Image (cartoon, grey):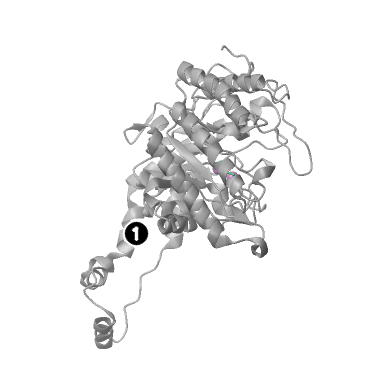
Amino acid sequence: MPQAFFPEVPKKIVYGGPKSRNPLEFKHYDADALVGGKTMRDHLRFSVVYWHTFANPLGDPFGVGTAERPWDDGSGSVDNAQRRARMAFEFIEKLGAPYYAFHDRDVAPEGKTLAESHKNLDAVVKVLKEEQQRTGIKLLWGTANLFSHPRYAQGAATSPNAQVFAMAAAQVKKAMEVTHELGGEGYTFWGGREGYQTLLNTDMKRELEHLARFLHMAVDYKKSIGFQGQFYIEPKPKEPTKHQYDSDTAACLNFLRTFGLKDDFKLNLETNHATLAGHEMLHELTLAVDNDALGSIDANTGDPLLGWDTDQFPTDIYLTTHCMRKILEMGGFTTGGVNFDAKVRRESFEPVDLFHAHIGGMDAFARGLKIAHAIIEDGRLAGNLSQRYATWDGPLGQEIETGKVGFRELETRMMAQGDSERTPSGRQEMLENLINEYL
Ligand code: XLS
Ligand code: NI
Ligand code: NI
């Protein structure tokens, strides 16, 4: 398929180095370059999302789509979807990303019946499979869209209607099968409309139990078909519902533990969702890593002045540095990757804008990776942290941590001493400066 859809873009986006002024070259992402003995390609495992990049017309609540997508004839036909699949692979191949991700309904149109929807999906999956084989591009994860169709307006697995739950189950079953068929390394459950608008009409306890039942069914089915991919839950606090059940890392961990699902799921963390939850991405990442639950990331960013999920491409090096620092600290991705769940602005309507956006995101993460690696090698940040907790490694701290003492012993000790010593300075500004030394 030589250059059918993006004639203005070279066959391959190459690494031009930091001095390059070519918008269609990488300045920092050099796939084969080694960082700490591992290639950038393997560290970052970049993934392109089908929904925003290939299937989003760029509409907003005030206006229709603006995107010029010459490969799209607007018919919504299977034929059109197959052509879009070829285009998608031309794009990903030129970009040089090793992975992609999709929802069932991004790749193929929903039919009038479930059987027709399954058939449509199979017809496009055939093309996806061919293109994966042709290019070597792999599927990071698949998922099902359980939020666009009107039947899901009041939830899918958490619908007050058991019929809707059954439809969602059938849809996820099929989406898991095609993910398995395409060799997907994971499968994501984002809550979609699993949440509520008002508690006046909602039995929250029952809905959460249904969600858990649904996920247990998914785990059972996964085992029955021999699908080895990692399951992910993707936290998000609001939008589309006022309260989403999978609101943040802490809520997800609590849910997974309560319902005996912790061992079967990891988290797919998205920066913009962290912001909406009132957390920094670093908080979400840290909590996930601490609980052995970080699987993958949806790399994007919000706008600090806007309160919704703007899903912008990440350009902030501070953010990408923190992301990569946590990922390096956990020993790198296994099944996950840096998945660009991001869309170009409505004003950026030309196909070439899709390249600019991804090149910028990949460069921002490549720089984050190099900087994070250097900060870890430097060792001062980690050294400061262990120093700050040094008393916990001493006799008193160890007695407390190992449960050798209780309130009585501690009171006796402090009575004798009169007061505790003062904790040394937290050195926040010095540490912030340390990070900036590397930016
Ligand atoms: C929406 C979510 C969605 C998931 C996949 O906000 O980020 O795109 O990543 O369903
Ligand atoms: Ni996402
Ligand atoms: Ni999002």
Q: 242 and 308: which one is in front?
A: 242
Answer above or below: position of 136 versus 330.
above
Q: Residue at x 37, y 43 (%)?
A: 328
In the drawing, does residue 197 fall left or right of residue 144? right
- Residue 335 is at least partly visible in this image: no
Which of the two residues, 343 or 29, is positioned nearer the viewer here? Answer: 343
Q: Amino acid at mark 1?
A: Leu
Could one spot residue 87 in this view of the protein? yes
Instruction: Identify the residue at image location x=42%, y=30%.
Output: 41
For the residue with label 1, is its CB less than 8 Å from the closest atom of ligand 2?
no
Q: Residue at x 39, y 54 (%)?
A: 260
Residue closest to the far front? 163
Please provide percent x and percent y for residue 353: 65, 29
Q: Position of residue 326 (x, y in %)?
A: 40, 48
Residue at which label 1 appears: 385
Quarter assignment of residue 202: bottom right
Image spot of residue 255 (x, y percent): 46, 57
Q: Position of residue 68 (x, y in %)?
A: 72, 26
| Badge 1: residue crowd in 10 Å (few <14, some 14–19, many ≥20) | few
Residue 423 lies in quadrant? bottom left
Q: Mark 1 falls on what kind of element?
A: helix
Q: Nearer the viewer, residue 40 or 231?
A: 231
Horizontal relation, residue 423 to residue 234: left or right: left
Location of the N terminus by quadrant is top right
Ligand 3 in which quarter: top right
Q: Nearer the viewer, residue 102 or 62?
A: 102
Image: 427 above or below 299 = below
